[in-house]
Image: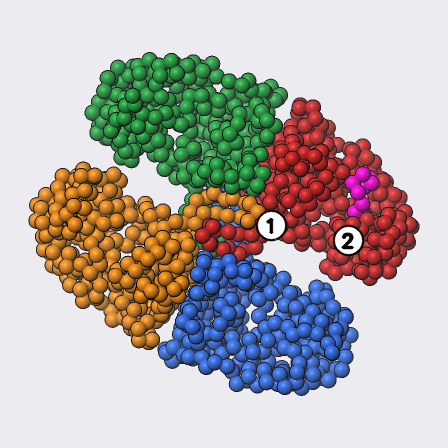
Chain colours: A green, B orange, C blue, D red
Amino acid sequence: MPKTKSQISIGVIGVGQMGRIHAEHIVRRVHQARLVAVADVDAKRAQAVAEALGAPRWYGSPEELLQDKTIDAVVIVTSTDTHADMIVAAAKAGKDIFCEKPIADTVPDGRRAQAAVERAGVRCQIGFMRRFDPAYVTARKQLDDGAIGRPLMIRLCGRDPTFYRRGKGTAFVKTSGGIFLDMCIHDFDLARWLMGAEVSQVFAKVATLGPPEVHQLDTQDSAVALLTYSDGRLGVAESSLLVPWYDIRTELVGTKGTLQVGALEYQPVTVMSAAGIIEPGIPWFMERFGEAYVAELQHFISALASDQVPAVNAGDGVAALAISLAALQSAETGQPVNLVAA
Amino acid sequence: MPKTKSQISIGVIGVGQMGRIHAEHIVRRVHQARLVAVADVDAKRAQAVAEALGAPRWYGSPEELLQDKTIDAVVIVTSTDTHADMIVAAAKAGKDIFCEKPIADTVPDGRRAQAAVERAGVRCQIGFMRRFDPAYVTARKQLDDGAIGRPLMIRLCGRDPTFYRRGKGTAFVKTSGGIFLDMCIHDFDLARWLMGAEVSQVFAKVATLGPPEVHQLDTQDSAVALLTYSDGRLGVAESSLLVPWYDIRTELVGTKGTLQVGALEYQPVTVMSAAGIIEPGIPWFMERFGEAYVAELQHFISALASDQVPAVNAGDGVAALAISLAALQSAETGQPVNLVAA
Amino acid sequence: MPKTKSQISIGVIGVGQMGRIHAEHIVRRVHQARLVAVADVDAKRAQAVAEALGAPRWYGSPEELLQDKTIDAVVIVTSTDTHADMIVAAAKAGKDIFCEKPIADTVPDGRRAQAAVERAGVRCQIGFMRRFDPAYVTARKQLDDGAIGRPLMIRLCGRDPTFYRRGKGTAFVKTSGGIFLDMCIHDFDLARWLMGAEVSQVFAKVATLGPPEVHQLDTQDSAVALLTYSDGRLGVAESSLLVPWYDIRTELVGTKGTLQVGALEYQPVTVMSAAGIIEPGIPWFMERFGEAYVAELQHFISALASDQVPAVNAGDGVAALAISLAALQSAETGQPVNLVAA
Amino acid sequence: MPKTKSQISIGVIGVGQMGRIHAEHIVRRVHQARLVAVADVDAKRAQAVAEALGAPRWYGSPEELLQDKTIDAVVIVTSTDTHADMIVAAAKAGKDIFCEKPIADTVPDGRRAQAAVERAGVRCQIGFMRRFDPAYVTARKQLDDGAIGRPLMIRLCGRDPTFYRRGKGTAFVKTSGGIFLDMCIHDFDLARWLMGAEVSQVFAKVATLGPPEVHQLDTQDSAVALLTYSDGRLGVAESSLLVPWYDIRTELVGTKGTLQVGALEYQPVTVMSAAGIIEPGIPWFMERFGEAYVAELQHFISALASDQVPAVNAGDGVAALAISLAALQSAETGQPVNLVAA
């Protein structure tokens, strides 16, 4: 018997920058959700966020939050290396789970998290927010409607002004798993979702091409990858952290036409001066995907409230992770890497 | 002594389509605001909206709502011909006022409303939401920053798929005051705001150019106007209710360049098929100005909460109304009509 | 009996900037044409151009050239005030005529030229080159194909960097007849051609809005006009000489959609730097309409060679002239001016 | 002692579709050039073209044309497999050479042709016309001016409506060397020219992804390649013959910004109808690169006339060929292929 609920009680685990944004969205933007607690290993931060957002309870550890019986579901926004354990623990506690990407930092850990979720019979959505962006939603619908026939080839562009915005903070890319795990994983998820098939081989390169400051950070700022699908279809992806404006675009070639998603311009405001025609670029990810972050949480909550299974499940999380890690392995070995079917 | 408040209690008067949208925004999107009551001459509608949105009280008449002492401010979304009286009554009741445009349907009534507001010392904002659209906000800032020098000429385009969307309902344009009062008034407000000056003369034409169905509606579907500013600067405006997609664009020529606001495309999704390159148009006003409707209310509430005076006051409402009615008079007489300085 | 010719012998009268360009096009770009002579009141200039372009003969006066029996047709590129007399003389000499716009600087003179052409049975094309621009040709074809149904309203934008490019030379606009006769006349021709009807009333304003240097030139740099067609359809036009880049755009609202011609960008080259997204503007008219100037001459020559009547005849020249002068009269009197049907 | 010439006498070898276009350009569009002869193994075709274009002489074999002492330079537009021998013969005959790409169909043959040119001291330009396209010229200038700093990564898109336009004729791609040699070679030339460096490794895939008709043609219709430069910089290229409109775009990420060349739209004509916003696509290569074909020949002729060395020499031809063939080898072996420095 399906159990529908009028309101889902949420606990957010990890309230750094993104965790706090998710928590705010639950309070202010998402219907049928209630923020009942936040947890952070920095207890003061947990307290501050709880008070600022009017959450009734706060905890200094995820474990405590998971024992809170009033909580229906958790939103996990901790550091990448803790995702798998956190999912396992939340699943054991019987909580439904929304977890930021990536699901884990190794494929076995990802599979372990996926297995825990399936064993516990809880629901799990991974934070590939692009799938909820209105433009990508329209594109997916166009594909479903046959606007370009069968997709044959995909081109993915993921450029980010991380270096311009964060400067030295760019090093976070390393701690968050490197450019493939932190950035390209979004493109690899799109590569699966829009082509409707699994990638079977990756050949990739990474490089540190930025100015000397970036080299000192011992991180990668540039990546390219060539994707082959199991049925012979093809894709290319490229990513850079060195561009001045946020620039995410995807193109598909199909049997009856081509499809492009994404634009360079942030706002339709054009100045023509002696310098030329000037339009504003997209500052960063929240200006591009702000509504998608709301929509993915709304999707998760609405699914729980209506006793349905949300899209973008743990298996999707493992599959995109596997491509990312295959790309890393290819870049390290200089050889194409085949992906084993799940 | 300034009185700041942490939360403003709002009553919405008139909960037809737009009134309900404003009420929802107060409940779900606007900070520091609380919807405490709604009123509608259709009492059942008032009750239904109150219950759906969780408003504690509802009234079958505006008068009753105005007597509710718990209400700090009202949002007036009744029919155009009642705006002036409603503002006068709300001002007498000591409520701060947000009123949908136009402020009235005659200039004397508009002035009467303005005087009542000023006499009562309440605050009044008129619903020219375009001023709060992110793109127009950026454009205004560009002007302030001197990006195009001093603006010399303005071109205003206001095209609306009313006929495509509403069909026979297009007749509402007549009851709402005709194309100048219902539609062009937004452009006339932009004409004042972006040029930073008053229009001193209008020459205008209206016409019914649509298919026979429109002619039967006895309404106007097309308008053009030539604006002269008191210092000799110039403008042109055109409006149509007959286009398939919502299309609001504004252009300025300045001493150092030109500025354009607005785009045709709804979303950055492009399909190239045998039919050509196809992009989606903007369906209607909520798809274009949805966030602006939230932002104008947020501006109003934030101003009240911090004991400040919101922008776009009753005087602005009267000035845009005066241009609209001068345009109508010009269209009826075939002569240019001079506007008297306020 | 139709007389087809394999090659048309051309004499160019007036070889200043535009005359020389036309002469070069005849030599290098136009098929079935031969430049046999040039004439200029500055005989040295005539000689220099003839030698540079390999024209066999040159003359120090138009009259001499018109007596040259080897010449089939003339291209008239003299100053505006001489156009009518030149057309009359060429017609009397039995030459087919291509004349730069405007056909004359008064309507009676325009009619006199038209009458002379018709009396002599020669062919006459006026230089409204925009009608031969590939984009406008496509737009006209779209209209013919019913892409937007019946056109109802037109918007014309004619912005020119004359002041940026010519500086003090901007004064030429005055000598060439002012902004309506020199610039807007192209838009007024489009207004007739694209709407397929005659303008019956004009209300217009001109102004000098540019920096002090322009005021010293005693010329106009800005103009707006509201057009009414005899069947009640409407149009607006605006023109400025003060913009940094050449910007000619036309929009039509039709019963089934809208049509736009023209773009801001000169070349598809986009730089995203810290300053924003930057594209190149269109420098000036030759960068925008260079091919249209070739195409209009090719049309003229091909028509003569195949014994047909070229498009854009003297009557078109008079009609656009009449609108321009009505706009001027309206700007001077402050009243709408009705146009008498030809 | 430099020898400048006022006019260069040209013989065109091979007057199929492209050869005839080049011949026409020499006659009608290129300054300082004279078409004195054409040759084709189909003697009737040679005669027909010579007569149509007014060339004084025609030959039924290239050898005869090469013996024509009045000829300064030849334009070679024969089938790909003959290019190298033709260049060697022309060099021996002392003719300057313009040869369509590719320079040969094997690297040793390309090097043999290059050596023959160098030994004979004649000049040789390879037909990479994109380098002469106004937009690419502007882009190259922007790079030289430092608009985006040092280029770090390149993305090349080469999509062609060959299948839509030629249908079964698509098989020509196979005879002309396959997709890498016929199509991608243009992108590989851009990859060298715009990045200013040599590609050191290629990993590539090809596929036949089109509808069954294409599979029957036993040709490839899709290709992707990942490029590594000797200094670690990166690139991706993708190509398809299956798109409805011609679509060539290039993007560069640099240390100070990004640069994009190319647009989807053919003409600035936009129709908004119930179907959406529709713009025309670029039909095929002549609509996109028509002027570039004229400009590359003009560059060649102007260089000869002023006794200078034209750009895009035989070495450039060999280098782009080597990348194309390395891509083919990679696609066949499934392994990355290293390029040996010349």
User: Residue B336 got which mark?
Assistant: none
Q: Quadrant of the C terminus of chain B?
A: bottom left
User: Residue D282 got which mark?
Assistant: 1
Vertical arrangement, residue C274 with respect to residue A180, above or below: below
Query: Nearest the camera: D291 or C125?
Result: C125
Q: Is disc 1 in contact with disc 2, using a CB cutoff of under 8 Å? A: no
The amino acid pointed to by label 1 is Ile
Percent from the top left, x then y, of residue B45? 18, 46
Binning the other alpha carbons within 10 Å of mark 1 as few (below 14), some (14 to 19) or many (20 upward) gives many
The residue that appears at 12% across and 41% down in the rendered structure is: B57
The residue that appears at 68% across and 43% down in the rendered structure is: D167
Q: Which residue is mark 2?
A: D20
Percent from the top left, x then y, of residue D85? 85, 40
The residue that appears at 11% across and 56% down in the rendered structure is: B89
Vertical arrangement, residue C194 with respect to residue B271, above or below: below
Magenta residues span D74-84
* In magenta segment, residue D63: no
Task: State the separation of the CA atoms marked 1 and 2.
Answer: 22 Å
Label tally: 2
Percent from the top left, x then y, of residue D99? 78, 45
